[in-house]
Structures are given as C-alpha cells and as structure tokens.
C-alpha cells in the first residue's frame, strides 16, 4: 500500500545488515568465493563500528566470471561479466531517533548473448569475424577468426569482441526517524544516477542513456499498545528525468529505445491495523498521481552510419519519437483479517484493488531492443486496474507448519507486448527483427495456489524439511485458443529441501555444521500465448542441489575463526530452459536473425537445437573470516544452495 502504483505485483524489500549495536566496537568480515561453472571469483570486505551513538559501515566487493557452460552447448558465448561495488553508511543514533546518510557505487560490465551460430555446425560464432580482410570495402569470405576459442570463453577481460552493457549506478540517501510522542516521523530523500551504454563491438556505445531519480518519502507511524491500534500514514514518490547521449560517430549507429522524458510521481496513503485477542484487522487506501512528458526526436539517414539528429520539419527526417504529455491518477486499497484458531491454526483473508500507470517504455518504445525484437509503444495506453481476493489456511505448530493460499486477480487494461502480423502474412518485420507492440485492450485473469509445508520437530532439532508449491493460471477472456493465456506465465513449481544439523561438541573445532539436499521440479507449460510463435511450450525438468557448511572455532576462545560453505546447483547437469527465460529465443545463423522460423526450427520443442540454455552444474566454495564482534548471518551460512 505504501510503496506506489508500480508495486502492483508486490514489493521486495532489501534490508542492509544491522550496524554494530555495542558502543566502542569495530567489527567486520572478509568473504571470498569461487564457482566452478563460470569461474566466478568474488571478494567482499566489510567493516563497521559504533562510536557511542555514531555508527558507520563501509564495504566493497568485486566479482568476475567468464562464460558459463550448459550440457547442450558447452561454453555459451558472450555470458561473462565483471562487477565492482562500494557502499558507505554513517548514522547518528540518539534517544530522539536517528539520522543516516548512505552512498553506493556500482559498475557492472555484462556481456549480452544473442545466440549467433554457424548454420552448418551449430557452433556459437562472432557477429563480425575478427581481423577479417576487406577488398574495396567488401568482406573476403573465409578471412578472419569466426569462432570463439577456449581462450575467448575463459577470458575475464573487459569485453570488446562481443555485445555488452556497461552500467554505472550511483545512489545517495538521507534517512531520518524522529520520535514524536508515542509515534515516529520518518523523512527520506535520495538521489540516483544510472548510466547505460549498449555496445555491439569495440568501446563505443550504440545506445547510451542516463537516468536520474530523486525519490522521497514522508511517513508518520503511531501505535497504542493499550488499544492494539496502529496507524501508518504519509506520502512518497519520485521525480525522474532521462536523457539520451548524442549520436555516436560513424560507423556506429545510435539506438534510441525511449525519448528524453520527465516523470513526477506522488502518492498519499493511510494504513490502519487493529489487534484483538485472536483477530487482527488491517486496511488501507492510497491515491497516486503520475505526470510524464516526452521530447520529440527526428533522425536523418535513419539506421545508416551517417544517421544524425535534426530539428523538426527537416525534409526526409524519420520521426523517432513524437512529443507527448500524459497524466494518470488512480487509487488502490485493501482490507484483510487474520484469525487465530485453536491448536495453532489460523485463517487469513484479503480483498484489494490495485492500480498501475503505464511505464515509459510501454508508452514510447520505438527501437530494436537487446532481446532482438523491435518494440513499439502506445502513448494512448490506459492505467491498469485490478481486483484481487485471497484466502489462506495454515498452522504454525511446534513440530509442523504449513499454509495453503488461494488467490484470484482480475486486471483491466492489461498491458503486454503483442507480436504483430504483416499484412502480407507472417511476421511484421523492422530492422530484420519481428515487431511487438504494447497493447492494453484486454482484461486478464491470474489465479492460483501457493503452499508450503515445513517439518521441524522440536525434539529433533538436527532435522528440517521445507517444501513449497506454486501454481498460476492465466486467462485473457474473449480471446482465441492461441491468445487466451498471459504471455510467459511461470510453470507450476515444487521445491523441497532437507537439512541435517550436526550436533556441536564442546571439544570440537566444528560448530553449526550442516548438510543439505534439495530439488526443484518444474512441470511443462503448455498454456501459452502461441499466436505467431510469441512464445513456445516448455518441458518439465527436475533440478537437484546439495550443500554443506560449518564454522571453525578456536578451542580456547570458542570464537569463530572462519566459516566454510560448499554448495552445488543443478547437481546432475540437466539441460533445461526456464519457461520465462527470454534467451531461449536468441538465435541467428551467420549473424542473420532468423526470428520468423520459430515453427520450422522449434515446432517440436523437445528437439530444440537453438536458443540459449540455463547454466549447467555449478559448485560454489565460500569462505568467511569474521573479526571484531561480527557474527555470521543465516544468509551467509546457507550459501547459494539452500
């Protein structure tokens, strides 16, 4: 309710590790890891302290990985990345509340796979042969290096011979919480700068843009413990502006997916919660306003090396973006209840209304995107409005806990990118790629069941068994058989993991040791939006994982010296493709996109020979050295496999 209109699908809240609570302490950790599949090397250093009301925390990390492997192709070309990150926090913590300043910097260079292959052998190949020979501007057939070698696949160097993104993200926050009577007032303001360069080969970007955000949040929260009443109210939003960089020099051709634009969001909300003996009631309302304005863009010599931006009215100019101004308003709300039944049983129910304004790409897109499809926006899209009801029954018992939750959503003006047919039959094509246009003329129904079952006997704390299940059914009313399902609806999924904790002995140097085993089973997904091969059905698959970990402690001081975590995913090296993975559609032959032959190339999806598969077997090794008063967290100990 408090997060804003674009949180209609839910909110993931990332919380930083707590700052040291004990005055006069300095603590931290050093963490290093290696993963076998893509050779990932990662290192993180963290240091924090408490100077008696003045707390601080700094951390830095670096990761590098070469191309990953799958059991279908071996090494997958153009899947390497390099990333560095730094963050610092300074907090003044007093009896009246706290004031915190934080800043972070992220630089990520990530290769973009496009699935380019040789038509004869099926091998991955370079988009442009390396060191090729040209006569009178014409490529000499057979000259230059065509296929990546093992050295290319295993390289950690910054890429220059494959498509990649060069991303910079800077973020600053000033967060405050002040006690007022029995409540608190919170006031936060931030600033972010995100720079994105999309580079085909070399070091000059074809697509270059910078986005600035100024988010803000004012809230008041008060709780009366005598009456069990809790109120949270406030408003939040952001101001955002984006600009495209100028046209790059020839022979590079600029790509402009969205126009230069300005956006302003503001929303006010109120949430009220009341606790009774066995009943908790909660409800809230929110009203949002969004204004957006986009600037026009006109290009001369469109998609040619001498392409350039020109003023409106220039003869022969191509209209990349028309000017636009849009304002959206809408409200959302919910009311829910939880009732505690005898024997640790409970029931929950909730009814809600949601609202989401269209995003800038849905309104204005007009370019080939990294997924090798040409997307077109619609500036006349309406805001999505949804109604939802869910009910759950569960038990939080001493030895067993479970919950079964059923939900139903109906969304009006549902927005998605639909593939366009040509008036001559087949696909509509632009720049050699199929054309998709955002549409919002349909309603959509999303319904399903989620459930979990956890077994954790109080008398056998060395054992824990966790299970989860998700099934989502999607439906577009009034459509044909090939267009009646929401595109890329996830397949039904079951997860299960067993964890055995070894007993600690006072004389042992090993503490909190565990062994874990898990599986994930995904059923086939045949309920698809199949018109014009917008998507293909997917197969069932089962993945297994395993892990172990322990703390090494000093026999004298019993302090943790280091922690070791070993974990493996896709243990049996299964060749699989997640249904929602777009790279499964990335393929071309000899650098020529082949998007209209989905039927010929993949009509029998069980014999798929193109596209990009998910990562194969991966074994990870992680070691953590704490110092000061730092305690290894649950997240750190579980590693990547649990």
Image: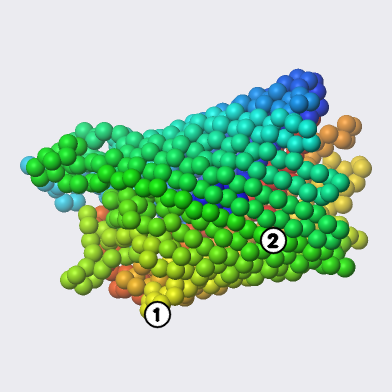
Pick the front one: 398 or 508? 398
Spot occupied by residue 319 in the image (x, y as percentages of width and height): 20, 47
Pick the front one: 437 or 70? 437
Tell me what residue is drawn at x 66 percent, y 63 percent.
350
Q: Which mark is residue 336?
A: 2
559 up-or-down from 485: above or below: above
Q: Earlier in the sequence, mark 1 or mark 2?
A: 2
**Residue at far bottom of view:** 481
Spot occupied by residue 117 in the image (x, y as percentages of width and height): 31, 58
Q: Which mark is residue 290?
A: none
Q: Which residue is mark 1?
A: 481
Q: Report helix, strand or loop for mark 1.
A: helix
Pick the front one: 115 or 241? 241
Q: Is residue 469 visible?
A: no
Tell me what residue is drawn at x 83 percent, y 53 percent.
502
450 up-or-down from 52: above or below: below
Q: How many marks?
A: 2
Structural crowding at the residue carrying mark 2, measured as other residues with C-alpha within 10 Å and reported as few (<14), some (14–19) or many (≥20): some
613 up-or-down from 367: above or below: below
Side (left or right) of 451 relative to 249: right
Spot occupied by residue 621 in the image (x, y as percentages of width and height): 64, 45
Tell me what residue is drawn at x 43 percent, y 34 percent.
212
The answer for how far apart the CA atoms under marks 1 and 2 are is 36 Å
Side (left or right) of 303 relative to 14: left
Side (left or right) of 478 relative to 225: left
Q: How is the image coloured?
A: rainbow
Structural crowding at the residue carrying mark 1, measured as other residues with C-alpha within 10 Å and reported as few (<14), some (14–19) or many (≥20): few
Quadrant where the image shows the C terminus: bottom right
Spot occupied by residue 595 in the image (x, y as percentages of width and height): 29, 63
Q: Is residue 51 visible?
A: yes
């Amino acid at each position: 309710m408090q997060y804003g209109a674009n949180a209609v699908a839910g909110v993931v809240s990332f919380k930083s590790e707590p700052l040291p609570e004990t005055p006069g302490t300095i603590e931290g950790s050093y963490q290093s890891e290696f993963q076998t599949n893509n050779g990932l090397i990662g290192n993180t250093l963290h240091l924090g302290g408490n100077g008696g009301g003045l707390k601080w925390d700094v951390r830095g990390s670096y990761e590098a990985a070469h191309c990953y492997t799958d059991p279908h192709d071996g090494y997958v070309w153009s899947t390497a990345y390099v990333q560095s990150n730094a963050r610092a926090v300074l907090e003044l913590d007093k009896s009246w509340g706290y004031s915190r300043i934080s800043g972070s910097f992220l630089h990520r260079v990530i290769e973009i796979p496009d699935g380019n292959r040789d038509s004869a052998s099926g091998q991955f190949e370079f988009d442009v042969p390396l060191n090729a020979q040209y006569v009178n501007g014409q490529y000499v057939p057979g000259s230059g290096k065509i296929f990546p070698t093992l050295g290319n696949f295993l390289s950690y160097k910054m890429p220059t011979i494959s498509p990649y993104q060069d991303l910079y993200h800077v973020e600053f926050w000033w967060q405050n919480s002040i006690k007022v009577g029995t409540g608190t007032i919170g006031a936060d303001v931030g600033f972010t700068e995100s720079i994105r360069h999309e580079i085909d080969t070399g070091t000059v970007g074809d697509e270059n843009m910078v986005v600035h955000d100024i988010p803000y949040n004012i809230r008041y929260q008060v709780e009366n413990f005598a009456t069990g009443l809790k109120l949270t109210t406030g408003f939040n939003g952001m101001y955002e502006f984006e600009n495209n960089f100028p046209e790059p020099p020839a022979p590079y051709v600029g790509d402009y997916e969205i126009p230069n634009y300005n956006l302003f969001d503001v929303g006010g909300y109120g949430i009220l919660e009341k606790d009774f003996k066995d009943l908790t009631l909660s409800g809230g309302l929110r009203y949002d306003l969004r204004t957006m304005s986009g600037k026009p863009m006109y290009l001369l010599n469109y998609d040619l090396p001498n392409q350039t931006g020109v003023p409106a009215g220039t003869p022969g100019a191509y209209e990349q973006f028309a000017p636009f101004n849009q304002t959206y308003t809408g409200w959302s709300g919910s009311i829910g209840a939880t009732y505690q039944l005898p024997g640790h049983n409970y029931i929950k129910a909730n009814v809600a209304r949601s609202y989401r304004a269209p995003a800038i790409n849905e309104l204005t897109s007009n370019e080939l995107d990294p997924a090798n499809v040409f997307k077109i926006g619609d500036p006349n899209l309406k805001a999505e409005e949804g109604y939802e009801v869910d009910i759950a029954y569960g038990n939080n018992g001493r030895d067993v806990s479970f919950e079964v939750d059923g939900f139903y959503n109906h969304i009006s003006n549902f927005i998605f990118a639909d593939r366009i047919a040509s008036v001559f039959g087949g696909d509509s094509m632009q720049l050699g790629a199929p054309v998709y246009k955002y549409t919002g003329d349909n309603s959509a129904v999303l319904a399903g069941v989620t459930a979990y079952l956890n077994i954790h006997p109080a008398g056998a704390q060395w054992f824990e068994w966790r299970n989860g299940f998700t099934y989502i059914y999607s439906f577009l009313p009034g459509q044909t058989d090939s267009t009646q399902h929401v595109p890329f609806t996830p397949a039904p999924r079951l997860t299960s993991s067993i964890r055995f904790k070894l007993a600690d002995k006072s004389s042992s140097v090993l503490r909190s040791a565990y062994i874990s085993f898990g599986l994930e089973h995904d059923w086939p997904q045949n309920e698809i939006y199949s018109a014009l091969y917008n998507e293909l059905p997917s197969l069932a698959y089962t993945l297994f994982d395993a892990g172990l970990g322990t703390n090494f402690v000093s026999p004298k001081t019993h302090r943790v010296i280091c922690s070791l975590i070993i974990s493996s995913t896709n243990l049996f090296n299964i060749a699989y493709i997640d249904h929602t993975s777009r790279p499964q559609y990335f393929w071309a032959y000899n650098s020529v996109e082949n998007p209209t032959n989905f039927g010929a190339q993949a009509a029998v999806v069980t014999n798929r020979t193109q596209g990009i598969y998910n990562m194969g077997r991966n074994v990870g090794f992680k070691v953590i050295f704490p110092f000061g008063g730092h305690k290894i967290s649950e997240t750190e100990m579980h590693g990547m496999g649990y």
